[in-house]
């Protein structure tokens, strides 16, 4: 067994730990790992180039930027915030948990690309969350806003990931089934997807509870602030 | 017929536009960076076709361009352009346009959804409108174009204003936009150089004999750790399955394959929430939402990931050996 290519992993860990620019770190790791595995330079270059252009779909979010940018210039985020502030019954927790539910169900139906960080979180969910949080605590600091946006992004991720594994027609389930078929175990996609359901439910509950706790923390701080001002 | 390749060409055109605007503003490195990326997007299909036909030269050139991108990236200082409209202007515009602003924004998910659901049945004069591979993403690209047109109409702004706002956002994201592609390429190189096999061998070496529980724990933690390293549970799954799951858990201890596969994969997904290597879910959103720390999103979701992992592992332990 040739353990030397593992040094590529070490390059990544050290590079990220020392907070170097991630792009050259990743390329160095690829080069180190490939060379230590005994790949020739021309082959390694071709492998790098081929794998890079094969994953071009990962940059698709760039196409959303002109439309989102134009709408933001015309006040989309400001409008989302004002609208949120007017909705009395819509609390921060209800907004985020509602989004989590919709995202997870869409994802279970195989519609992962419908929502996302560029399509829905930046233009809609993040500004609405900020407005909903301001209804609780009007004096949000910059750190609070950063944390709030991060919670919105995390909610999108959790909904997407743990719904996806339940969908039978692509991705994880087919990969699992394909692996077993290669090794002589025949399973239907449905029998695999079924066992992703418990975790999908647990993930929904856990993220919802965390959102609710986050809201309660904001409410406590608001109460404290109120008490100080009143006293 | 609308194919995913058209979307790549559209991205290439936009990247070259961004490069040209940066060149005009005197940002040489940034112009070169986006130009190289634009060329890689425009020539990607040619590279893949030539590679398949046994001509590695275009792919080698693409590899050299990737290295050039890596050399340029540290020279791109991430900086936000000044907002093009003042807060007062945006508030006034928000009041004037109201809910109309939501229409183009919601068109993006809506059109994508419609194409994903019905795209396969649409045809004009007997020709299918959408090619089957990557239909949802083709739908997303179409949705973006429609949303841009709708946004220009709603805001009564010229189209080029959309391009120039898009350029402002892309420059704010900067080199982080490149990471998902690079990490996917790294995963491929890791696989080809046998990193996976080496890790599986190490995991086997530390595996205690005769305890099904310990074996399952090493399997589950291995899925998490390997996903953290590769940034992708799909890369971790075959390695951990071939190393531990299949020979030991299934054949020796009689684990249920469906449960082991589904829940093992989900353990890996918990790892995806923890790692900067999954850049498209963790680092790009941090840049997109203009967080000051690139690890803000990971910090916000790490306790969820740990709790979901523990719950999944307990369920797997209770169910898998029945």
Image (cartoon, grey):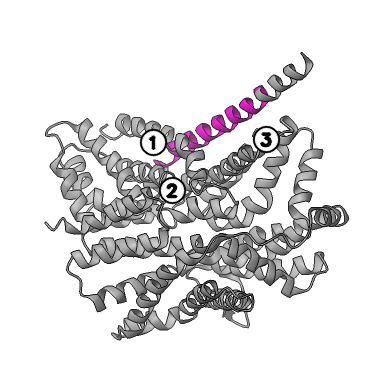
Question: Which numbered dot is residue B154?
Answer: none
Q: Is residue A104 above or below residue A212?
A: below
User: Is B44 positioned to the left or the right of A216 in the image?
Assistant: left
Residue A33 in the image, given as x and y percentages of width and height: 24, 62
Q: Residues within 10 Å of mark 2 (few under 14, many from 20)?
A: many
Please report the bounds of the magenta region as a residue range.
A195-220
Residue A211 in the image, given as x and y percentages of width and height: 58, 33
Question: Which numbered dot is residue A92?
Answer: 3
Residue occupied by mark 1: B309
Choose mark 2 or mark 1, whichever is in front. 1
| Disc 3 element | helix
Residue B37 in the image, given as x and y percentages of width and height: 48, 74
- Residue pictured at 56% horizontal, 47% vertical: B292
- Report the quarter where the N terminus of chain B lies: bottom right
- Report the quarter where the C terminus of chain B lies: top left
User: Is A185 positioned to the left or the right of B178 in the image?
Assistant: left
| Disc 2 element | loop
Question: Is A209 colored magenta in this rendering?
Answer: yes
Q: What's the CA distance linking mark 3 and mark 2?
A: 27 Å
Residue occupied by mark 2: A165
The quadrant holding residue A139 is: top right
| Disc 1 element | helix
């Amino acid at each position: 067994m040739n353990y030397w290519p593992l040094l590529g992993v070490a390059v990544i860990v050290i590079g990220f730990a020392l907070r170097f620019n991630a792009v050259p770190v990743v390329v160095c790791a690829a080069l180190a790992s490939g060379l230590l595995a005994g790949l020739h330079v021309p082959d390694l270059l071709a492998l790098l180039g081929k794998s890079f252009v094969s994953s071009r779909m990962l940059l698709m979010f760039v196409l959303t930027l002109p439309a989102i940018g134009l709408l933001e210039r015309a006040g989309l985020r400001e409008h989302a915030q004002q609208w949120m502030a007017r909705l009395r019954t819509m609390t921060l927790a209800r907004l985020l948990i509602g989004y989590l539910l919709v995202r997870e169900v869409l994802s279970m139906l195989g519609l992962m690309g419908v929502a996302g960080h560029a399509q829905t979180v930046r233009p809609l969910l993040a500004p609405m969350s900020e407005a909903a949080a301001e209804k609780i605590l009007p004096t949000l600091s910059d750190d609070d806003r950063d944390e709030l946006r991060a919670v919105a992004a995390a909610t999108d991720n959790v909904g997407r990931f743990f719904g996806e594994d339940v969908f039978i027609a692509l991705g994880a389930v087919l990969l699992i089934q394909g692996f077993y078929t290669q090794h002589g175990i025949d399973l239907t996609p449905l029998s695999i997807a079924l066992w992703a359901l418990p975790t999908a439910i647990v993930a929904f509950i856990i993220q919802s509870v965390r959102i609710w706790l986050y809201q309660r923390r904001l409410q406590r701080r608001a109460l404290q602030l109120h008490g100080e001002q009143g006293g | 017929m609308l194919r995913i390749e058209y979307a790549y060409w559209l991205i290439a055109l936009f990247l070259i536009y961004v490069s040209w605007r940066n060149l005009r503003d005197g940002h040489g490195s940034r112009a070169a960076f986006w130009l190289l990326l634009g060329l890689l997007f425009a020539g990607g299909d040619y590279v893949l076709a030539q590679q398949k036909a046994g001509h590695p030269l275009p792919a080698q050139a693409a590899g050299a361009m990737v290295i050039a991108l890596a050399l340029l990236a540290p020279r791109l200082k991430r900086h936000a352009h000044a907002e093009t409209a003042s807060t007062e202007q945006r508030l006034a515009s928000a009041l004037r346009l109201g809910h109309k602003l939501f229409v183009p924004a919601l068109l993006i998910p809506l059109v994508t959804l419609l194409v994903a659901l019905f795209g396969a049945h649409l045809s004009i004069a007997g020709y299918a409108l959408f090619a089957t591979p990557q239909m949802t993403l083709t739908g997303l690209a179409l949705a973006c174009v429609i949303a841009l047109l709708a946004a220009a109409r709603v805001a009564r702004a010229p189209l080029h204003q959309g391009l120039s706002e898009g350029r402002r956002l892309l420059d704010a994201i900067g080199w982080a936009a490149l990471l998902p592609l690079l990490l996917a390429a790294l995963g491929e190189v890791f696989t080809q150089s046998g990193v996976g096999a080496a890790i599986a061998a190490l995991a086997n070496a530390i595996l205690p004999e005769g305890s099904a529980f310990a074996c399952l724990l090493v399997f589950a933690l291995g899925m998490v750790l390997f996903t953290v390293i590769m940034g992708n549970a799909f890369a971790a799954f075959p390695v951990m399955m071939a190393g531990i799951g299949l020979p030991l858990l299934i054949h020796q201890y009689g684990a249920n394959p469906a449960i082991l596969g589904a829940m093992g994969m989900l353990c890996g997904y918990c790892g995806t929430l923890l790692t900067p290597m999954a850049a498209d879910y963790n680092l790009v959103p941090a840049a997109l939402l203009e967080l000051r720390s690139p690890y803000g999103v990971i910090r916000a979701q790490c306790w969820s990931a740990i709790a979901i992992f523990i719950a999944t592992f307990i369920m797997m332990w209770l169910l898998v050996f029945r």
